[in-house]
Image (tube, grey):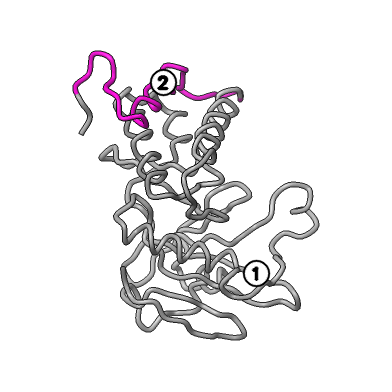
Amino acid sequence: MGTQSDLRHNGSIIRYDSAVFDPFEPRLFDETWLMAEGYHRGSSLGRGQAHFLNFGGRDMVLRPFRRGGLFGKINRDLYLNAGLKNSRSMQEFELLKWMHGEGLPVPRVVAAWMVPVGLAYRAAILTERIPAARPLEEVLQDKPLEQHDWALVGQTVRMMHDAGVDHSDLNCRNILVDHDHKVWLIDFDKCRRRPSGSWKSANLERLKRSLIKENSKADGLHWTEKDWAALIAGYDGKELDGAASLP
């Protein structure tokens, strides 16, 4: 699971996995420095913009915490400071560290950053990049998935739920599929471990709404209700019609 260490740098607090980097380079949270030194390798689109970088032979993803909606137009990245352990970056660090240690298909967390700003704070998180993986939404824009791949998506969500993890923003952008058809889950901001409950079905409903929403756009997705049925079959551990048992 790695060794957790903390350091302070220019007023910020960084929690990092010293099994990945020791010592840790605090400027990995400085986008200007990353670009100037040539470590920055591109960015994703959208509110939850992520920056791709390569440093020390590792491909990583830097994700600053950003607000959305109308409030995000006024306050883009400040959150009420309720202490280090309650900051969004540190909470996600701890959850990802635990999930990775349990063998769940999530990226390895490298470090979390938090800097107090008066009564508020800014934050970011750094994870390893999953090789040759693309968001489910992006894959479905190019081509349809096979039914057994949809079942694997369902199985992966079930693994997360059986571990008691509530992914409060499960959508088709937070599920990745790699070249070997392995399914990964990302972006665990505001997520937590919980006793079993109705949140599991709420996660699935949110995922389906995201697929319907993206499918309704002009370019659409290669997605049908039959695909959703295959996902649920995988989630429930059932065999697909005319298919052998899934591994």
> Which contiguous range is marked in magenta?
217-244
Q: Is residue 200 above or below residue 193?
A: above
Horizontal relation, residue 220 to residue 75: left or right = left
Q: Residue at 32% across / 61% down in the picture? A: 101
CB under 8 Å between discs 2 and 1? no
Residue 231 locus on image (x, y percent)? 39, 27
Question: Splitting the image into 4 quarters, where does residue 98 fall?
Answer: bottom left
Which residue is under mark 2? Answer: 229
Q: Residue at 42% across / 16% down in the picture? A: 226
Q: Residues within 10 Å of mark 2 (few under 14, many from 20)?
A: some
- Front one among 189 and 198: 198
Q: Quadrant of the C terminus?
A: top left
Residue 153 locus on image (x, y percent)? 37, 35
Horizontal relation, residue 20 to residue 115: left or right = left
Q: Residue at 38% across / 74% down in the picture? A: 17
- Front one among 233 and 45: 233
Q: Name the chief secondary structure element in magenta.
A: loop
Horizontal relation, residue 43 to residue 53: left or right = right
Q: Which mark is residue 122?
A: 1
Residue 224 locus on image (x, y percent)? 46, 18
Quote the CA–CA distance across marks 2 and 1: 41 Å
In the rendered structure, does residue 216 fall within the stretch colored magenta? Answer: no
Q: Earlier in the sequence, mark 2 or mark 1?
A: 1
Q: Which numbered disc, 2 or 1, marks the residue closer to the eye?
A: 2
- Front one among 100 and 174: 100
Residue 244 locus on image (x, y percent)? 19, 22
Q: Amino acid at mark 2?
A: Ala
